[in-house]
Amino acid sequence: MTLETLEGWFTLQNLRELIAEYRAFGPLIGFLLPVLEAFLPFLPLVAFVVANANAYGVLFGILLSWAGASVGALMVFWLIRRFGHLKLFYFLSNQKQVRKLTTWVERHGFGPLFLLLCFPFTPSALVNVVAGLSRISVMQYMLAVVTGKLVMISTISFIGADIVSLIREPVKTAIVLGAIVLLWLVGKRVEKMINKKMERDIVMPERHRKSAGNERLENRWNRGKKKASNGSKH
C-alpha cells in the first residue's frame, strides 16, 4: 500500500464507517480486546482504548477499556502467582534483574506500581509478571492495577475521544500528539527515577554487605596470622 493510497483511504467518511463497524460487534469486543492485550503485549492497547471511546462514548468507552485491562492484568498476575514455581517460569524467576525487581516491589508495594501503571507506554506485561513472582499481597496489586489503569485509560480516552475531529483540525492533532509525547517523556522519567531508587535500595546495600564481609574475613585472617606469629616466637 502506497502513501497516496493510505491518505486516500484515511478520510472522514471511512473513519466513520470503521467506527460504526467496530460498534456493530457490540461492547463485548471492546472488553475482550484489552483483556487479550494483557496476554499479548504487542497488541496496541492505546488503539483499543481510542476505538472504545469513539464507538461507545467517552464514559462507557472508559468503563469497557478499564474493566478489560484490569481483568487481563489481574489474570496474568494470578497465573504467575499460581504457576510461577513451575519450570516453565524458572528462567524468569532465576534472572538476576527479575529477582532485584521482585525484591524491590516487595519492599515498596503500592506506590511505584501505581505510578508505573498510570502511563500508557510502561511495559505493563513485565509489571504483571514481576508482581506475580513477588510476595506483594493480592489486595495491594489489585488496588494498584485498578487505580493506575483508570488514570491511564481515562487520559487516553479524553485525548482520542473524537478521532474524526483530529483529521479536520490539524491544530488539535498537534496538541494531541504533543500530549502523547509528553506522557511518554514523563513515563520514562518516572521509570528512571524508580530504577535509580531501586539501585540505591538494593544494589548499594548488597555492595556494602559484600564489602563488610570481605573486611571481616581480612580481619580474621590478620588475627590468625598474628596468633601464628606470636606462637612461633614462644
Image (tube, rainbow, N blue to C red):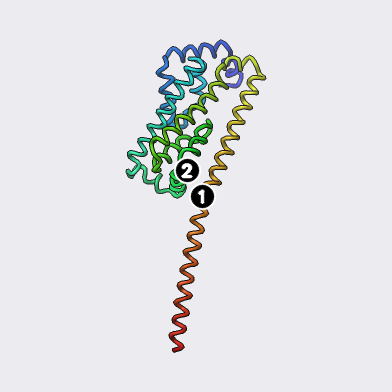
Which amino acid type is shown beneath numbered disc 2? His
Q: Which mark is residue 23?
A: none
Which amino acid type is shown beneath numbered disc 1? Asp
Residue at figure coordinates x 47%, y 67% from the top left: 216
**CA distance for labels 2 and 1:** 10 Å
Name the quarter where the N terminus is drawn: top right
Name the quarter where the C terminus is drawn: bottom left
Which residue is tagged 1?
201
Residue at figure coordinates x 58%, y 12% from the top left: 12
Residue in the foreground of this view, choosing between 212 and 49: 212
Q: Position of residue 14 (x, y in %)?
A: 54, 12
Which mark is first along the chain, 1 or 2?
Answer: 2
Q: Helix or strand or loop: what does disc 2 sit on?
A: helix
Q: Position of residue 16 (x, y in %)?
A: 53, 12
Q: Is residue 80 above or below residue 207?
A: above
Which residue is tagged 2?
108
Discs 2, 1 touching: Cβ within 8 Å: yes
Residue 146, picture quadrant: top left
Q: Helix or strand or loop: what does disc 1 sit on?
A: helix
Q: Is residue 205 above or below residue 160?
A: below
